[in-house]
Image: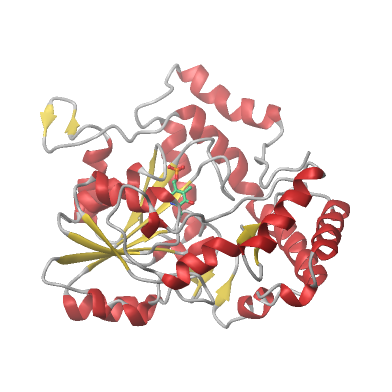
Amino acid sequence: MINVTKTFLPPFEEYAAVLKRAWNKGWITNNGELVQELEEKLKEYLGIEYLLFCSNGTIVLQMALKALGITKEVITTPFSYVATTNVILWENCTPVFVDIEPTTFCIDANKIEASITEQTQAILATHVYGFPCNIEKIQSIASKYNLKVIYDAAHAFGSIYQNQSLLSFGDVSTCSFHATKIFHTVEGGAIICKTKELFDKLYLYRQFGHIYDDYLSVGINAKNSELHAAMGLSILPKMRDIINKRKNHFLTYSEQLKSKFSNFLQEKNFTYNYSYFPVLFKDEEQLLQVKINLEKHKIYTRRYFYPSLNRLPYLNQTNCSVSEDISSRVLCLPLFYDLSEESILFISKQILKTIQPESISN
Ligand SMILES: *Cc1c(COP(=O)(O)O)cnc(C)c1O
């Protein structure tokens, strides 16, 4: 069986050796030594000043909206994981969907201005598959209308844009370290911001809003444990190897399937983390044919992202024709560290057997 992702696990002894430090101290949560060390190493790896390691990639989005004082309309993308929309609703704000670009699948910055109202307070956009949004345009709109920018950078760990981590843009960026993501801590996430003031606020939010007996603000429990930090500390030194392996897999798929994504990836000032290999088919029927055929061989792909979030049944229905079209015919293929070249060739061959290569449009 081949799944769409497979969690990268370090050798058990390496993980155990790091974890032993927590055992020896008898301290396993509440901002322990390993959590603090992971934060320092992440800041160094990412070239970032303010970062907090938290319990997952969803709660950090909630914290971002709350810390920035967002209570009304949030312009957002319909092409993301459901968490991106749900956090807006959870915080009692209103999501306003703006359609996506057909090339990057990120929010179409040229369509944002038309959706701004008196109530708009923020833009929450996703760097889809680790590709950068139109950061310059989004920033210029945000400055013009005095909006906050939050990036859901759950996919963007290891992607480099303008010689900086893709996690370093926006007023706040968030990341997920879930076991399915390129860098993981089993469950986990991070929130990145630019000012000490915001950092202090988020620091308090993470631990119920108090420091010992001083109760200073509202808060939530977004702390993560020494067991999770130990996983991160064991994997972080291997990131170069992990990204290189994935890059090779990605290029093999590209060559076999004549994917044009690789052209896009050669864009100046961008280095991809190779976190996903999406394939855009001619239509949904063809996607389903491919998916079902691969399943016969016990190969499991994922419709990622599907459905387009503007079509969630608990929302007022709006149209986003590009996102609806893309989500109906995009499929992510298996991509993980120890996927064999033989498997990639087999998967590609099966896809080409089902369809004509011309009908892959990315
Ligand atoms: C994975 C993911 C999340 C949620 O992260 P968790 O750590 O699972 O809570 C949010 N947004 C996007 C785009 C994701 O891919």
Residue appearing at x 50%, y 63% in the figure: 128
Quadrant housing residue 264: bottom right
Residue 103 at x, y = what percent?
54, 77
Q: How is the image coloured?
A: secondary structure
- Image position of 261 with respect to 209: above or below: below
Which quadrant is the N terminus positioned in?
top right
Q: Is 360 left or right of 212, judged from the image as shown?
A: right
Q: Quadrant of residue 134?
A: bottom left
135 in relation to 236, above or below: below
Residue at image position (37%, 53%) is: 84
Residue at 38%, 64% in the rendered image: 77
In the depicted structure, whether residue 54 falls above or below residue 136:
above
Q: Quadrant of the C terminus?
A: bottom right
Q: Is residue 66 left or right of residue 187?
A: left
Q: Which residue is farthest front?
A: 285
- Which residue is nearer to you in this view: 361 or 119? 361
Between 111 and 20, which is closer to the camera in this rendering? 111
Q: Position of residue 76 (x, y in %)?
A: 32, 63
Q: Position of residue 32 (x, y in %)?
A: 40, 30
Q: Can the viewer see residue 23?
A: yes
One can see residue 334 in this view = no
